[in-house]
């Protein structure tokens, strides 16, 4: 049966684009659906500052009038300029287990990319590195996080059959939270943190309110640390002020500020940051991808009343000139006792590039295991 590809042209189409993922995975115990309300904003050029330097189209695949796949095609012009590439990206791709469907979706992105002068396709990627990226290739029996992609095992098999090859991999770790005050991991970080604190004249800064984080533009300084720390990493494009404003409005109000750790130098300027939050994976599954009519209740319950025993580590960033100097020990020495007191049993690391040795070394003294691996695929056009 012929596969028909249609471009998303209306808000109703876009809602169908978003909901296809939920319908495809609604009986899967490991998938975590995106919130429809958040994704509508992400895909809206009027609300997502990434469209200042990205262009995108969205496509649905139909068979006999039924949606059987979806994909986003986009170009991050800033990343292409930064890395001297001519890449088209694909992302938010989902499809039934039919190679004709996945082939039609990918060929649509390939052709769109060619018309834009691109010579290579990569993905799955997001507009920027703060969007989910990387197709799961190991860890299909592990609960996903709200900031990462879950997909069925047949996805990467389709990619390889369509001539796509490995570009780069990310890994994720499950990290046990130390249980006792005398735990060797905790003691080590406390000792190292004290040495680094004295030697480099650094200190930990904590916040009591979101207003304090935004005061005098401090939040932009935090993202400046992130931009400088992540600048050498694969495909990274600098987070803009407009994007910072959007993320701040969307997420700051839900953060438990105890889990935000900032390391400052003697001039009270940030040099490193670490951010975690209680996992919302189970709450998002109960919400079924929507805030209304009752999805908001499950999320608020998970944030304020009955948080998960899983800690999602969203971001860890250290300025290049402070890397390999033990600054990360100060972050962990601050967060570990808090995580333990809050009842977290283990943490989920954010996806880290396999080639990022400095990032990988963060976990060398923890009881941790790699439990997920994801891949960016590529193909020459």
Image (spheres, rainbow, N blue to C red):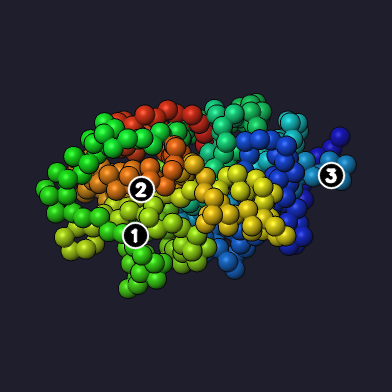
Give the residue at mark 1: 222
- Would you say the residues marked 2 and 3 are in contact, meaning their CB atoms lie under 8 Å apart? no
The tag earlier along the polypeptide, 1 or 2, is: 1
- Report how far apart the C-alphas of labels 2 and 3 lie in the structure: 49 Å
Quarter location, residue 22? top right
Residue 55 against residue 364 in the figure, above or below: below
Element assignment for label 1: helix
Of callouts 2 and 3, which one flags the residue occurring earlier in the amino acid sequence?
Answer: 3
As helix, strand or loop, the secondary structure at mark 2 comes to helix
Q: Residue at x 59, y 29 (%)?
A: 140
Q: Which of marks 2 and 3 is in front?
A: 2
Q: Crowding at label 1, few (<14), some or many (≥20) Cα neighbours within 10 Å? A: some
Real-space Cα distance between discs 1 and 2?
Answer: 21 Å
Disc 1, disc 2: CB below 8 Å? Answer: no
Q: Quadrant of residue 232?
A: top left
The 10 Å Cα crowd at callout 2, few under 14, some 14 to 19, many 20 or more, is some
Q: Classify residue 365 as left or right of residue 108.
A: left
Judged by depth in the image, the label closer to the viewer, 3 or 1, is 1
How far apart are labels 3 and 1 at the CA level? 46 Å
Residue beneath the point at 33% across and 67% down = 218
Q: In which quarter of the image is the N terminus?
A: top right
**Does the image show residue 28?**
yes
Q: Nearer the viewer, residue 34 or 67?
A: 34
Q: Which residue is drawn at 35% across and 69% down?
A: 212
The residue identified by callout 3 is 66
Q: Where is residue 364 in the image (x, y as percent from the top left)?
A: 31, 30
Of the image marks 3 and 1, the number of the one nearer the N terminus: 3
Q: Name the residue under label 2.
A: 338
């Amino acid at each position: 049966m012929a596969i028909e590809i249609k471009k998303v042209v209306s808000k109703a189409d876009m809602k169908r684009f978003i909901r296809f993922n939920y319908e495809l995975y609604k009986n899967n115990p490991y998938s975590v659906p995106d919130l429809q309300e958040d994704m509508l904003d992400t895909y809206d050029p009027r609300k997502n500052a990434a469209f200042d330097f990205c262009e995108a189209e969205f496509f649905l695949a139909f068979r006999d009038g039924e949606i059987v796949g979806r994909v986003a095609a986009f170009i991050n012009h800033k990343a292409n300029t930064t890395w001297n590439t001519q890449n088209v990206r694909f992302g938010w791709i989902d499809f039934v287990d039919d190679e004709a469907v996945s082939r039609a979706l990918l060929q649509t992105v390939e052709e769109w990319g060619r018309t834009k002068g691109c010579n290579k396709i990569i993905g799955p990627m997001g507009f920027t590195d703060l969007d989910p990226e990387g197709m799961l290739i190991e860890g299909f029996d592990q609960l996903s996080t709200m900031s990462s992609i879950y997909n069925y095992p047949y996805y990467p098999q389709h990619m390889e059959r369509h001539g796509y090859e490995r570009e780069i991999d990310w890994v994720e770790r499950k990290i046990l939270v130390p249980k006792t005050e005398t735990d060797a991991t905790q003691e080590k970080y406390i000792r190292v943190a004290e040495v680094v604190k004295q030697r480099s004249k650094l200190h930990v800064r904590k916040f009591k309110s979101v207003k304090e984080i935004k005061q005098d533009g401090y939040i932009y300084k935090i993202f400046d640390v992130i931009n400088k720390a992540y600048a050498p990493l694969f495909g990274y494009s600098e987070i803009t002020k407009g994007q910072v404003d959007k993320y701040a409005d969307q997420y700051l109000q839900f953060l438990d500020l105890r889990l935000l750790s900032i390391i400052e130098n003697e001039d009270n300027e940030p040099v490193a940051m670490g951010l975690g939050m209680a996992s919302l994976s189970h709450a998002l599954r109960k919400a079924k991808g929507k805030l209304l009519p009752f999805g908001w209740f499950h999320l608020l319950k998970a944030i304020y009343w009955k948080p998960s025993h899983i800690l999602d580590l969203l971001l860890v960033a250290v300025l290049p000139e402070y890397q390999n100097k033990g600054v990360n020990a100060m972050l962990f020495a601050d967060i570990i006792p808090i995580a333990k007191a809050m009842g977290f049993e283990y943490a989920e690391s954010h996806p880290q590039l396999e080639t990022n040795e400095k990032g990988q070394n963060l976990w060398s003294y923890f009881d941790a295991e790699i439990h997920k691996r994801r891949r960016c695929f590529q193909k020459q056009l």
